[in-house]
């Protein structure tokens, strides 16, 4: 069994937090912009929710990519940590927003988070492979 060094563990934690915060900041900025266009009181319109869902997918991929860059490509535990953190926070958000948002939207956000993180993580791996084989 291989024991990780303190630097490695610190890098993994930093990568997970940085990936999640990048995603969160982008989501908050987009939701602020969309709030100028969109819903007042009541349920948000379908277009607002769809744009928000798609943008969150992209931002989650960015978070996965950033996490891999910071954790270095061999640290799959960072991938699992980022997915775990996102699912944990997403579940809490789903519970608290259940009465205010369409149910399909909250469930969809939770469902797309793990594959979107993985896609971002994988994209970084492809870039590493492309430039390291030259």
Image (cartoon, rainbow, N blue to C red):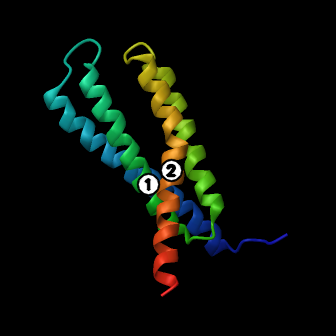
As rendered, which of 83 and 95 lies closer to the eye? 83
Residue behind mark 1: 63
- In the image, 60: left or right of 121? left
Quarter of the image for residue 43 reads top left
Q: Reply above or below: 106 against 117.
A: above
- In the image, 44: left or right of 13? left
The local secondary structure at tag 2 comes to helix
Count of labels shown? 2
Q: Reply above or below: 132 against 17.
A: below
Q: Residue at the location (47% across, 66% down)?
A: 124
As rendered, which of 71 and 114 lies closer to the eye? 114
- Residue 10 image point, x, y percent: 59, 67
Which-is-in-front pick, marks 2 and 1? 2
Q: Residue at the location (52% across, 68% down)?
A: 125
Question: If the image is split into quadrants, where does the N terminus sit?
Answer: bottom right
- Asked if the residue at tag 1 contacts the one at tag 2, i.e. Cβ–Cβ closer than 8 Å, the answer is yes
- Residue 69 image point, x, y percent: 48, 69
Q: Residue at the location (47% across, 62% down)?
A: 123
Q: Earlier in the sequence, mark 2 or mark 1?
A: 1
Residue behind mark 2: 117
Q: CA distance from mark 2 to mark 1?
A: 7 Å
Query: Neighbour class for label 1 at 10 Å: few (<14), some, many (≥20)?
Result: many
């Amino acid at each position: 069994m291989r024991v990780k060094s303190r630097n490695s563990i610190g890098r993994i934690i930093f990568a997970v937090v940085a990936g999640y915060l990048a995603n969160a900041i982008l989501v908050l900025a987009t939701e602020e912009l969309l709030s100028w266009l969109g819903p007042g009181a009541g349920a948000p319109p379908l277009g607002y929710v769809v744009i928000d869902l798609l943008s969150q997918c992209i931002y989650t991929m960015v978070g996965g990519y950033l996490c891999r860059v910071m954790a270095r490509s061999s640290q799959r535990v960072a991938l699992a940590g980022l997915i775990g953190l996102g699912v944990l926070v997403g579940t809490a958000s789903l519970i608290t927003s259940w009465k205010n948002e369409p149910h399909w939207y909250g469930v969809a956000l939770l469902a797309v988070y793990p594959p979107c993180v993985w896609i971002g993580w994988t994209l970084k791996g492809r870039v590493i492979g492309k430039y390291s084989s030259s």
